[in-house]
Amino acid sequence: MPKATRFRGPLGKSPLTDATWNTKPGIPISGGATWTSTTLDPATGALYVPGGNPAPDFAVGVREGVAGEAANLYSGSVVVLDAKTGDYRDHYDISPDDWHDWDVSNPPILVRSQGGKDMVVVAPKDGHVYGIDRATGKRLYKVPATQIANAEAPFVVGKPVRFCPGSVGGAEWNSPAFDPSTNLILVGEVDWCYAVTLEDTHKLETAPMGVPWSGMSALNPFNDFGHPLEGDKEWHGWVYAIDADTGQWAWRAKLNYPVLSGMTPTAGGVVFFGDVDGNFYALNAANGEKLWNEHIGGGIGGGVITYTADGKQKVAVAAGFTSPMWPTKITTAKVVVLGLDGAVTAQ
């Protein structure tokens, strides 16, 4: 166990070993990095850390786990640490044996439901919403929240295999939200299918360090994480509202564009969010009815905040999201602040 250093401090205690990776010669153990932030429970001192995919992303055959054990720990998991010491406390396997690049891509949320359930709720890129009992680690439900198709099909060399959601599908870097007044989990999703053609094992074993290493056979570097087939050029988005206690969906809304933004429900019964085309929405949080929307001039991929200034409620959102992975309109980024003239914040 490495000792404390002046710059990095002590290393937290962990049961981590390389036993669950069992990689082939020439295949280093890699992956499981975190995308975003973590979730802290101040009452218990527990820090919930979302873990990304193992690598190579799509070639599960070169990193198989040991029989009877979960493969590639602690990738595709939520790991629970002691916030003061960094010591391992627990973990929840969310996407074991991942070969689709279905990371646990955003921090989980901690929910006390109206029925008294104390849960971790997480929405990874695999297109599902998971409710987990915090005390026991038992999975309470796994609910699909976007199109799921061909998810069990193995990838093969020399032939594209289509699957949904694709490696840029499902829920990306923004967490679901909980509306305590309706007992609903609200999540924005990407409905976009991809195809992957597997790289042969020899090329994976002989790839030099520092180059893209996804396991995808592609001449175009923009396709290293798969690509849509001709019939999948169109994409869509979903907003799902799920009962926190039962996992049953209460309502859902399909949109013309993917929803990457955060979901922000308010005490006034409204939920705010945006899509990658730059459309900003306000829906009735109880039933999904559209109350208002406006195009604000750029893709929306970040969080949405609401706050009070001079006794008046405002809503702020960043617009202008662009990425080579996403065919969004190129524009100058900006922060847009909205509100109603004369409206006083409800107490």
Image (cartoon, grey):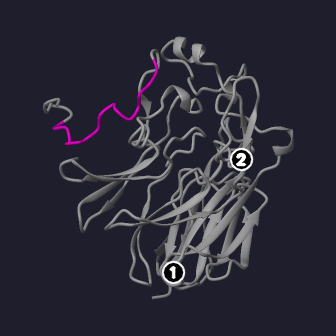
The segment highlighted magenta reads 9-24
Among numbered discs 2 and 1, the one appearing first in the sequence: 2
Q: Give the structural element (helix, strand or loop) at label 2.
A: loop
**7 drawn magenta:** no
Measured as percent of width and height from the top left, residue 297 is found at 72, 54
* Rendered view: 260 above or below 282: above
Q: Is residue 305 among what the camera can see?
A: no
Q: Residue furthest front?
A: 67
Q: Quadrant of the C terminus?
A: bottom left
Residue at the spot 57% in from the left edge and 22% down from the top edge: 212
Measured as percent of width and height from the top left, residue 149 is found at 72, 51
The circle on residue 150 is 2
Left/right of residue 155 with respect to residue 8 in the rendered view: right
Q: Give the structural element (helix, strand or loop) at label 1.
A: loop
Residue denoted by label 1: 183
Q: Three-letter amino acid code at disc 2?
A: Asn
- Looking at the image, which is closer to me, 282 or 67? 67
Residue at the spot 71% in from the left edge and 28% down from the top edge: 197
